[in-house]
Image (cartoon, rainbow, N blue to C red):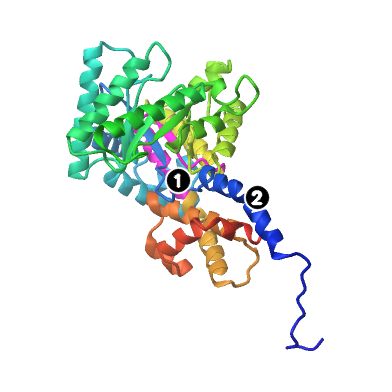
């Protein structure tokens, strides 16, 4: 057949067949859209910092930044010494060190959680009432002044019977205080700990629904994180993955699944010396969380290390190397957020995050540029990979590892372009699979 000759196209099925199949799958289409809406496309903080409710104060964020800078000045005063401690390659030493210092000066904490659970303990009711009201006032004032962390909120006590009423009251006082001070901040985050049954998640959703109705708020305005700290939250008595049911029980309000390293490890009988975020038990739990959350728009967060960078320089360096290694390990496994328990952890959190995005930046930019321009290279990428590449660059931009100017130079793309690749329509991802 010669070039330019029209190809004969023939079909065997009546149009009604396709229409009938589409009609039969309409409920599945709707369920896919409801259960798996995809990532929300908003910024995900690289860490969460927990501060006990009685310790939290107006200067907490700045104090953490200053203490982190002081630790750098004392134990790694220049780019070379910091890079030597962490094993950073020479070409990353200067950029990472400079960006870490700038971050500590500008935005030392990305996500702050005022803790009324394990970090706070059981106090007289009047004392916790006052602390919850104070937390609301301080956060409202910081938001008004522009000094608040991008994300901030509280961790209440859990929904188990002995502390349920106390947790509900603390949450009510905190949210009511915010409303009276002008409204809920855009970056409000709440954490529900020690969840074992999906019904506890449903109870939290109903509690927030009642608060929204009491204040005339838009339904679904308030979301919350589910903290995974018990074996029952991973595997139910009937052998099913409890955490998947919890996401559905939240009725669209779940924003994150946060792994609790030490409570979960202890629940499984792991001895104290071996409770760590890289223990096989931890890897299993987070893998189940990750699969359950995939496509739902719920983000997964790693836990923390309890090895603090304090004491003589040798001990600080050892703790820094451990924290840096654990953070890099988590990033490679797509756990883009973790917990930090001490100001001394902040320098290595940002060093690990910045190194992760800067070392892979040029290759990711080149691959995405080739995909966007449909040019050949040594790797053939599909829409799903383009989504991952764009997401990688956006996360690097959000945390300060990358600048939009350098990304634009290497990709020829704007932030809006990156966002369109990172959040494609469902059909765009499946068409070439």
Q: Is residue 92 left or right of residue 113?
A: right
**Quadrant housing the N terminus:** bottom right
Most foreground residue, 343 or 425: 425
| Res 71 quadrant in image | top left
Q: Quadrant of the C terminus?
A: bottom right
334 part of magenta stretch: yes
Residues in magenta, as a range: 333-355
Nearest to viewer (mark 1 / mark 2): 2
* Residue 50 x %, y %: 35, 29
Residue that appears at 56% across and 21% down: 232
Q: Which of the two residues, 351 or 292, is positioned nearer the viewer here?
A: 292
The residue beneath circle 2 is 24
Q: Secondary structure at mark 2?
A: helix
Image x and y of residue 70, in percent:
29, 36
The answer to whether 432 is drawn above or below residue 312 in the figure is: below
SS of the residue under disc 1: helix
Q: Which mark is residue 353?
A: 1
* Residues at circles 1 and 2 in contact by the CB criterion of under 8 Å: no
Q: Residue at x 68, y 60 (%)?
A: 18
In the rendered image, the vertical position of residue 429 relative to residue 129, given as above or below: below
Percent coordinates x, y for residue 390 in the rendering = 50, 58
Picture quarter containing residue 394? bottom left
Q: CA distance from mark 1 to mark 2?
A: 46 Å
Query: For residue 268: magenta?
Result: no
Q: Which label was assigned to residue 11?
A: none
Specify whether 228 is left or right of 209.
Answer: right
Q: Is residue 263 visible?
A: yes
Residue 217's image quarter? top left
Question: Residue 218's spot in the image, x, y percent?
Answer: 31, 41
| Residue furthest right as drawn | 1
């Amino acid at each position: 057949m010669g070039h330019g000759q029209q190809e004969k196209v023939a079909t065997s099925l009546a149009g009604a067949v396709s229409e009938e199949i589409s009609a039969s799958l309409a409920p599945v289409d709707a369920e896919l859209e409801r259960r798996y809406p995809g990532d929300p496309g908003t910024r995900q903080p690289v860490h969460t910092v927990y501060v006990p409710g009685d310790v939290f104060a107006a200067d907490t964020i700045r104090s953490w930044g200053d203490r982190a800078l002081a630790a750098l000045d004392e134990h790694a005063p220049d780019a070379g010494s910091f890079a030597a401690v962490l094993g950073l390659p020479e070409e990353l030493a200067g950029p990472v060190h400079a960006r870490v210092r700038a971050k500590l000066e500008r935005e030392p904490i990305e996500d702050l959680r005022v803790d009324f659970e394990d970090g706070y303990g059981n106090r007289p009711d009047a004392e916790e009432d006052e602390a919850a009201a104070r937390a609301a006032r301080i956060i409202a004032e910081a938001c008004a002044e522009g000094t608040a962390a991008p994300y901030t909120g509280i961790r209440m006590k859990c929904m188990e019977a002995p502390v349920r009423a106390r947790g509900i009251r603390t949450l009510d006082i905190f949210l009511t205080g915010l409303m009276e001070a002008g409204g809920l901040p855009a970056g409000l985050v709440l954490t529900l700990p020690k969840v074992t049954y999906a019904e506890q998640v449903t109870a939290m959703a109903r509690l927030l629904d009642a608060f929204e109705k009491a204040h005339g708020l838009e339904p679904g305005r308030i979301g919350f994180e589910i903290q995974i700290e018990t074996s029952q939250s991973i595997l139910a008595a009937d052998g099913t993955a409890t955490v998947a049911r919890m996401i559905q029980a939240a009725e669209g309000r779940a924003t994150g699944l946060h792994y609790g390293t030490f409570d979960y490890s202890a629940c499984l009988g792991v001895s104290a010396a071996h409770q760590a975020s890289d223990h096989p038990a931890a890897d299993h739990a987070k893998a189940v969380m990750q699969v359950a959350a995939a496509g739902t728009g719920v983000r997964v967060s790693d836990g923390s290390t309890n090895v603090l960078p304090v004491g003589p320089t040798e001990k600080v360096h050892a703790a820094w190397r451990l924290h840096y290694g654990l953070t890099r390990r988590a990033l490679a496994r797509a756990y883009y957020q973790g917990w930090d328990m001490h100001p001394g952890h902040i320098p290595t959190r940002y060093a690990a995050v910045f190194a992760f995005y800067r070392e892979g930046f040029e290759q990711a930019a080149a691959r995405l540029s080739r995909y966007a321009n449909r040019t050949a290279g040594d790797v053939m990428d599909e829409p799903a990979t383009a989504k991952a590449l764009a997401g990688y660059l956006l996360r690097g931009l959000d945390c300060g590892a990358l600048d939009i100017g350098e990304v634009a130079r290497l990709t020829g793309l704007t932030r809006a372009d990156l966002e369109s690749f990172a959040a494609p329509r469902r059909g765009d991802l499946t068409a070439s699979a």
